Each structure stands twice: as structure tokens, then as C-alpha cells.
Amino acid sequence: MELKHLEPNHTDERGEIRDILADVEVDAVTYLTSRAGAIRGNHYHEQTDQWDYVLSGSFECYTRAGFDGEKKMTITTAGDLVYHPAGEHHALKAIQDSTMLSLTKGPRRGTAYEKDVVRLKDGEKLA
């Protein structure tokens, strides 16, 4: 997991401009809403890289580098961008009602949403 808090690239009297990703091609941009307590993820992708950008609210973001990796948790809030490379186990638990964008590069997109998702079983789940 790589976590960055993104600051505006430009601000003036009209508002701000913020690049979420630059110089990265993506195959899908997905908008998600999560109610407080909702858990998303508890899976990994074999070929797909994923970036999650928190628009509002906050999440407990859990990651693990494969089944033998150490489980890590960090709190993400509005303006945070989290990168999950292919193979990294990840889960997000909404602390409050929240929204985010999920940007992906790889076969996990559109009607092929489940094509590159490997769900973690009960004893393997992160959240």
C-alpha cells in the first residue's frame, strides 16, 4: 500500500484543481458510497492495480502483502489516495458515511468486475 494525501495543483477564486492520477492510464473509474460500518474489499486482484481516492468521510484501510504478509491498518480521510498493487490483499471499513473513487488498471472493470477479484475466505479476511 502506498498512501498520499493530495493537495490542490491550483487554487484561485473559482476553486481548486486537483490531479488524482497523472501519467497513469486507467481502464475504469468507479464511484462508491459506503454507509458507516460497511466493509468493502476483503479481496485481491491477480492482474489489476487499484487506486482508491477518498472524496468524503473516512475509512479504516487494511492491507496485507499476500497470505504471509503482515496485516496493516491506516485511517484514510478525504483527499487521501491509496495505491493497491496487483496481489495486495485489501479491505476498507467505513468509519462514517463515505464516498470514494476507485481507479483501476487491468481486467477488473465494467461487466468484468469479478474477472480479476479473488475473494478472501472467512479466516483470511482483513476486516
Image (spheres, grey):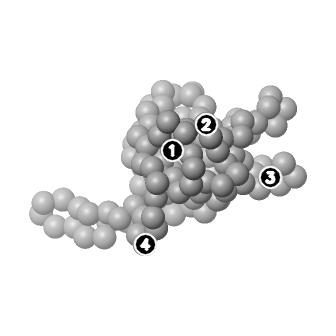
On the question of residue 60 being in view, the answer is no
In space, the residues marked 2 and 3 are separated at their CA atoms by 19 Å
Q: Which mark is residue 114?
A: 2
Say which label, 1 or 4, has the lower sequence index. Answer: 4
Secondary structure found at label 4: loop
Residue type at mark 1: give it: Arg
- What residue do we see at 42% from left, 48% from top? 29
- What residue do we see at 12% from left, 60% from top? 14
Which image quadrant for residue 59? top right
In space, the residues marked 4 and 3 are separated at their CA atoms by 27 Å
Residue type at mark 4: give it: Asp
Q: Which mark is residue 109?
A: 1
**Circle 2 or circle 4, nearest the eye:** 2
In space, the residues marked 1 and 4 are separated at their CA atoms by 20 Å
Instruction: Give coordinates of residue 54: x percent, y percent.
Output: 45, 48
Circle 2/circle 1 CB separation < 8 Å: no
Location of the C terminus (image quadrant): top right
Compared across the picture, whether 20 is left or right of 72 comes to: left
Instruction: Give coordinates of residue 80: x percent, y percent.
Output: 47, 55
Residue type at mark 2: give it: Glu
In space, the residues marked 3 and 1 are separated at their CA atoms by 22 Å
Identify the residue under disc 3: 66
> Tag 4: Cα neighbours inside 10 Å, few (<14), some, or many (≥20)?
few
